[in-house]
Image (cartoon, helix red, strand yellow):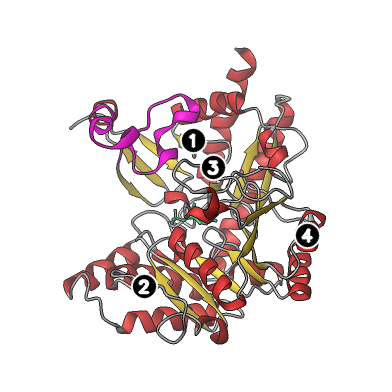
Amino acid sequence: MMRSADLFREAKKVIPGGVNSPVRAYQSVGLEPPFIAKAKGARVYDEDGREYIDYIGSWGPMILGQADQRVCNAVMEAAKDGLSFGAPTAREVEMARLITKMVPHVEMVRMVNSGTEAVMSAVRLARGATGRDKIVKFSGCYHGHSDPMLVKAGSGLMTAGVPSSLGVPEKAAEDTLTAEYNDLSSVRELFERYTGEIAAVIVEPVAANMGVVPPEKGFLSGLREICDQSGALLLFDEVITGFRLSKGGAQEYFGVRADLVTFGKIIGGGMPVGAYCGSRALMETVSPTGKVYQAGTLSGNPVAMAAGLAQLKILDGHPEIYEHIDNLAQRLENGLQSLVEKYRIPASVTRCGSLCCLFFREGGVRNYPEAQQCDTALFARYFKGMLRRGIYLAPSQFEAIFIGDAHTESDIDKTLQAADETFAEMKAE
Ligand code: PMP
């Protein structure tokens, strides 16, 4: 068996940075990543045989825990009948019906293969349906890596988009306008400046890509109002919050209607899946019924549908899962908060439902400029201490802690014990 360190050396020779998605490289914490060999329930195991309590859950999809037997069985059953047909199948109908049943205000669903693809397609649909080009996004919100969404977060209010990656033409980003999360006046200013030009406002209903930043009271409903007044569409990017905050996602949780919703992660049960959804009138603007083109060879893939359906049906039938994961997250939040106070660590805990975050900044975080004030060096020390004690957190200050149904109170208590020891060590250094 090759160890993680050997694998990483070999990986770097044939894969850029040794990884297929950047944050996996552990660059921001100055370590090399463990290579994962297998996972079960709330545990992951690396190639060196080390066991960890998993708070990444594949960055959100594994809400039931890893290798859930019911989901795995569904995948194996489906695979026996063929891996892909590129033709309509019964499972796609079942999936679309289940999503329309579980999620408020959604009448039609188009399946794609990732969250990036879902957002890219929904943005095209918003532009096609309104005949307008400009999109408002919030600094610090991530919506996948399509060109118009890769605009420098925090590039400054009221400025037209500046690409944050080489290879994104300025022209592809110039219609992306950036506002500040939890600040309705920054959105109103954009609408005044670009009257009649804005197709949609895209928002993570709970921002979970700058750490976890819950929306303040009135923020999401305020966006709804601004969109209604101006004829723009409200697009909830629920790639993280979908089927996690509640069965019906953020629309149900916060009682705010969105025109378009994107999903990913949980709806695939761990397989590569995304979806964008909305009213019949809007969704029929998509080809072949409408003139907004979007397609996919593997979209609605039977094995992926089987995994997603199995997971969603369990969530649909077991509302107590949401109570369990929210309670555990609250236990973690309370425990971390007391430890932060006990050791006088300059940090604060945020939480919404089963999404949690320990920010190394006092006084919480309500937007991207505040998130940027976090002490990432302190986070790296905390992260290393936790990893050494078998706690598998995302290797970045700006990611969520994901709690799933397989976690137990005892897992949370072990995690708090590890945090207690880590903070004590940090204070002593
Ligand atoms: N939107 C949000 C809110 C996300 O968190 C992510 C990924 N973390 C994406 C879109 C992109 O999804 P994917 O990585 O599946 O392309």
Q: Nearer the viewer, residue 190 or 296?
A: 190
| Tag 1 near tag 4, CB within 8 Å | no
| Tag 2 near tag 1, CB within 8 Å | no
Instruction: Verify whether residue 25 appears in magenta.
Output: yes
Residue 10 relative to residue 407: left or right: left
Circle 1 or circle 3, nearest the eye:
3
Circle 3 or circle 4, nearest the eye:
4
Residues at marks 2 and 1, CA–CA distance in whole angstroms? 34 Å
Q: Is residue 31 above or below residue 232?
A: above
Q: Visible in this render: residue 265?
A: no
Residues at marks 4 and 2, CA–CA distance in whole angstroms? 35 Å
* Three-letter amino acid code at the position of disc 4: Arg
Q: Residue at x 60, y 62 (%)?
A: 245
* Three-letter amino acid code at the position of disc 2: Ala
Query: Which residues fall within the magenta stretch?
Result: 8-36
| Ligand 1 under 8 Å from disc 3 Cβ | no
Q: Quadrant of residue 92?
A: bottom left
| Tag 3 near tag 4, CB within 8 Å | no
Secondary structure type for disc 3: loop
> Is disc 1 surrounded by few (<14), some (14 to 19) or many (20+) residues within 10 Å?
many
Residues at marks 3 and 4, CA–CA distance in whole angstroms? 23 Å
**Mark seen at residue 193:** 4
Q: Residue at x 24, y 30 (%)?
A: 13
Q: Earlier in the sequence, mark 1 or mark 3?
A: 3
Q: Nearer the viewer, residue 250 or 281?
A: 281
**Residue hosting label 1:** 395
**Residue hosting label 2:** 295
Q: Earlier in the sequence, mark 3 or mark 4?
A: 3
Q: Earlier in the sequence, mark 2 or mark 3?
A: 3
* Three-letter amino acid code at the position of disc 1: Pro
